[in-house]
Image: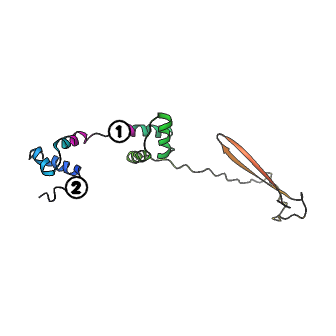
Amino acid sequence: MLGNLDAGGKEQRYKAIEVAASSYPVSSLCKLFKVSRSGYYAYLKRKNVDRDKEAALLISQVYARYEGKYGYRQIQLFLWHDDGVWMNHKKVLRLMQKLGIQAEIRRKRRVNMTYQAGERVAENLLNRNFTAEKPNQKWVTDVTQYRVGERWLYLSAVKDLFNN
């Protein structure tokens, strides 16, 4: 009927005892399945307890506070820095998956420069001829912008085409 009574983990054996407890005495079933009676009652006590309820609540609060922008690694850091709660990153990931929340992927903004008729556009003086016979004859430049915090910094490099 039951086959190998040692098969499966203790939790499976406890479940089998729970099913058969209405027909047989619990102490006999515990002996049959080779588990302690106190272990079985401890299983019944903790069966419906969610040990991660508070942690899941904290994670969802941090997720909402930062508008869902961050994944489990950043959420773990914010838990530590903002709330003083240290939680393993694997636990944060597991609970976020259980709650069905994940970081929103934010697309990088691309600026497409299109020129309208009548706008000022620099003349192409080099026509892709990037060699110079003497110094200070042809200079080229480029401007790069970097965002540092809330500010933009601009870097302008100037190059002499004769000797770089």
Rate crowding at label 2 as few (under 14), some (14 to 19) or many (20 or more) other CA atoms within 10 Å. few
Which amino acid, by three-letter code, is at mark 2?
Gly
Which amino acid, by three-letter code, is at mark 1?
Lys
Q: Nearer the viewer, residue 138 or 106?
A: 138
The x and y percentages for residue 46 are 25, 40
Query: In the figure, is residue 100 to the left or right of 158?
Result: left
Q: Earlier in the sequence, mark 1 or mark 2?
A: 2
Magenta segment range?
Answer: 42-55
- Name the image quarter holding residue 58: top left
Outermost right residue: 134
Q: Secondary structure at mark 1?
A: helix
The x and y percentages for residue 39 are 20, 43
Using the image, tell me which numbered label, if any, was put on residue 53.
1
Q: Quadrant of the C terminus?
A: bottom right
The x and y percentages for residue 29 are 12, 48
Using the image, tell me which numbered label, if any, was put on residue 126.
none
Query: In the figure, is residue 101 to the left or right of 164?
Result: left
> Marks 1/2: CA distance?
28 Å
Q: Which residue is label 2 attached to?
A: 8
Magenta-span inclusion, residue 53? yes
Q: Nearer the viewer, residue 77 or 59?
A: 77
Residue at x 40% of width, y 37% of height: 57
Q: Quadrant of the N terminus?
A: bottom left
